[in-house]
Amino acid sequence: MKIYQGIDIVEISKFKNVALKNKNFILDIFTEREREYCLARKDPHTHFAGRFAVKEASLKALGIGMSGAGIDHSFQEIETVPGPSGKPVLSFTGWVKKMSSKRKINQFTVSISHSADYAVASVILVGDKN
């Protein structure tokens, strides 16, 4: 078994400023299901910031980071939605799923937390030994 871990923290006020200045930011970064979930919350930017942290933590866990071939659409390929119990569920599609398969990832776990100023996410990926 091999364990990959990524963590990210986002300052909510800075995230909100970027989102308000760039009309397409939310559409470019988040899936339709993520947008529906966040926009239904009292303070959507807090929830968007948490999901943005998940996307960055996922890329870190995969060892890719924010630069590299295929990164262009990767934010849309990392989705976090609430499961039946409300616990966040992480899924990968497209190029990110391909990178996950390459690393033989067979299990994902994600945790998101918010405070007044910050959103933080931790992603743990478990794979078979190469």
Image (cartoon, rainbow, N blue to C red):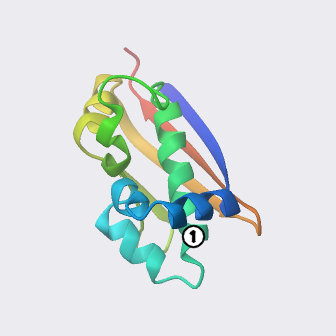
Q: Is residue 3 left or right of residue 12?
A: left
Q: Quick one: 14 or 54, which is closer to the camera?
A: 14
Q: Quick one: 19 or 98, which is closer to the camera?
A: 19
Residue 1 to residue 114: above or below: above
Residue 106 to residue 23: above or below: above
Q: Residue furthest front?
A: 21
Where residue 8 sits in the image (x, y, percent)?
63, 44
Label 1 neighbour load within 10 Å: few <14, some 14-19, many 20+ = many
Where residue 113 sits in the image (x, y, percent)?
66, 61
**Three-letter amino acid code at disc 1?**
His
Q: Quick one: 80 or 47, which is closer to the camera?
A: 47
Q: Residue at x 37, y 61 (%)?
A: 24
Q: Residue at x 61, y 69 (%)?
A: 46
Where residue 60 sits in the image (x, y, percent)?
52, 32
Q: Is residue 40 left or right of residue 94?
A: right
Q: Quadrant of residue 129?
A: top left
Where residue 114 sits in the image (x, y, percent)?
69, 65
Q: Residue furthest top?
A: 130
Residue marked by disc 1: 45
Residue 23 to residue 43: above or below: above
Q: Which image quadrant: the C terminus?
A: top left
Number of numbered discs overlaid on the protein picture: 1
Q: Quadrant of residue 31?
A: bottom left
Q: Residue at x 28, y 38 (%)?
A: 97
